[in-house]
Image: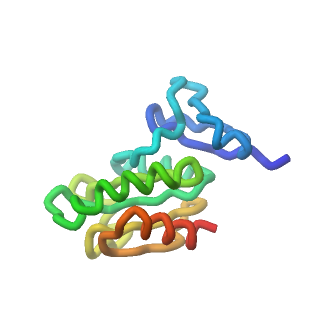
Amino acid sequence: MSDPLHIVCPHCDAVNRLPQARLQDAPVCGKCAQLLFNGRPLDVDSARFEKHVSRNDIPVLVDFWAEWCGPCKTMAPHYSQAAQRLEPGVRLLKVDTERSQDLAARFGIRSIPTLALFRGGREVARQPGAMDAGSITVWVNRHAA
């Protein structure tokens, strides 16, 4: 039997222990009783980013974006579709680089949108530019293993 996974709740940020075999069973948070996966990207600030990237045992995909960015707005519905396809195997986050300039600087975000894939708290892949849902899914699956 495999070790349980740590999954951070997208609602209350509690860290849940979940057997990997139960990922597909619509698991709920032990603290707030909300679904741990809702098929939508989660908007996060700097503090929530740290918790989700460092404490989730599943890969975490981050969309660095800004409200004024045309390509970011074009990619947003595709990113949401990718969340429906990739969860519960991957957590999807959105970071507004205007509100979280510290994260944009820390990760050297030079163009937006930029996708960054994290595993075990470390960045493992990066892709600048807008992509459609299919391309996002293929890219994540290639780099998340």
Q: Is residue 133 above or below residue 46?
A: below
Residue 52 appears at what percent x and percent y? 49, 49
| Quadrant of the rendered image containing residue 59 | bottom right
Whether residue 50 is visible, yes or no, is no
* Front one among 40 and 57: 40
| Quadrant of the rendered image containing residue 102 | bottom left
Q: Residue at x 46, y 49 (%)?
A: 84
Residue 80 appears at what percent x and percent y? 37, 51
* Direction from residue 15 to residue 22 in the image, left or right: right
Q: Is residue 136 above or below residue 18?
A: below
Q: Is residue 93 above or below residue 129?
A: above
Residue at the left extreme, as displayed: 68
Whether residue 108 is visible, yes or no, is yes
Please state the total of marks drawn on the protein image: 0
Q: Residue at x 49, y 71 (%)?
A: 139
Residue at the right extreme, as displayed: 1
* Direction from residue 7 to residue 3 in the image, left or right: right
Q: Residue at x 40, y 62 (%)?
A: 133
Position of the C terminus, as image quadrant, is: bottom right
* Front one among 8 and 23: 23
Residue 62 appears at what percent x and percent y? 41, 59
